Amino acid sequence: MKPTSFVPMVGEISAEDAGEIPGLGAVISHWTENGYSAEEWFRGLNDDWGTGGFAVRRGGEVQGFVVYAPPKNLASAARYPLGPIDEEAVLLAYVGGDTRTRRRLLVRMLRDLRQRGVGSVQAIASDHGMSNHVPTSFLLESGWQSLRRAPYRMSYYTLAHIDLKSAVEVGELARALVGRVKLPGIQSPVPGALARSAGEQRGR
């Protein structure tokens, strides 16, 4: 029997394992207006568009995950009064885990999208750390730019953006984070178990 690895590994989220990832169902439900289960959403997205998420696992335990897709696959995005979402951009819906894990997942997502020829990524981030959203502060600290900010349902949200058209800019962003994370393929232990962010402890 192959021994369990305790080195955190990043892998694509498939429809088959989507239902086993804690918290993923709630994220998909929120961003699809309760239209799909996690399994249904990933099956359709993977067939029509391709990879829409990665998860970090360590010894069988999920430490965090990231979800992203074209805006048309995340219907709830249209409800936020942040102006039009760029239909040519990919929308980052959520990234969770401790800070180190989230940075690792963010870099993995950006590398995947850059290799697929995506020009830009946007995100509807929560200024107050609401559940099922990316914290605004995390994105701004990771090199994203704020486009617009608006109140919605007793809270505030920011439309954040990052440009992937320049390989130089993407490389600079990765280098800015690489001191705190290891990119895929570098086998180096990352300490710490899943520590949910403060935003995951609050209700919508």
Image (cartoon, grey):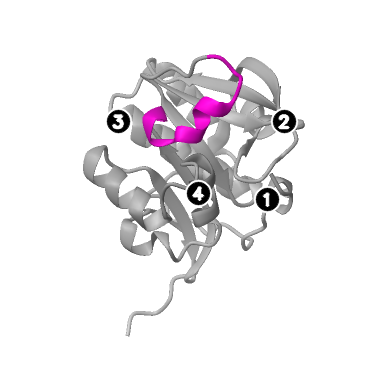
Q: Please name which of the two marks, 1 or 4, marks the residue nearer to the observer.
A: 4
The Cα atoms of the two marked residues, 1 and 4, are separated by 15 Å
Residue 95 sits above or below residue 76 on the image:
below
Is residue 203 located in the magenta-colored stretch of the structure? Answer: no
> Is tag 3's residue or tag 1's residue first in the polypeptide sequence?
3
Q: Is residue 70 visible?
A: no
Q: CA distance from mark 2 to mark 1?
A: 13 Å
Q: Tell me if residue 73 is in the magenta stretch.
A: yes
Q: Is residue 169 visible?
A: yes
User: Can you tell which mark lies on residue 29?
Assistant: 4
Q: Please name the residue that numbered disc 2 is placed on.
A: 127
Dot 4 or dot 3: first in sequence order is 4
The percent position of residue 45, horizontal first and vertical second, equals 30, 43
Real-space CA distance between mark 4 and mark 3, rounded to the nearest whole angstrom = 28 Å
Give the residue type at disc 3: Gln
Where is 120 relative to 57, above or below? above
Identify the residue at image location x=75%, y=31%.
Answer: 155
Residue 141 x %, y %: 66, 28
**Circle 3 sits on which residue?**
115
Which segment did they paint magenta? 70-83
Q: Residue furthest bottom?
A: 1
User: In x, y percent, where is residue 139?
Assistant: 61, 30
For label 2, the SS is loop
Whether the residues at callouts 3 and 1 have beta carbons within 8 Å, the answer is: no
Q: Amino acid at mark 4?
A: Ser
Going from the N terminus, do you reach mark 2 or mark 1 first? 2
For mark 1, what is the residue? 200
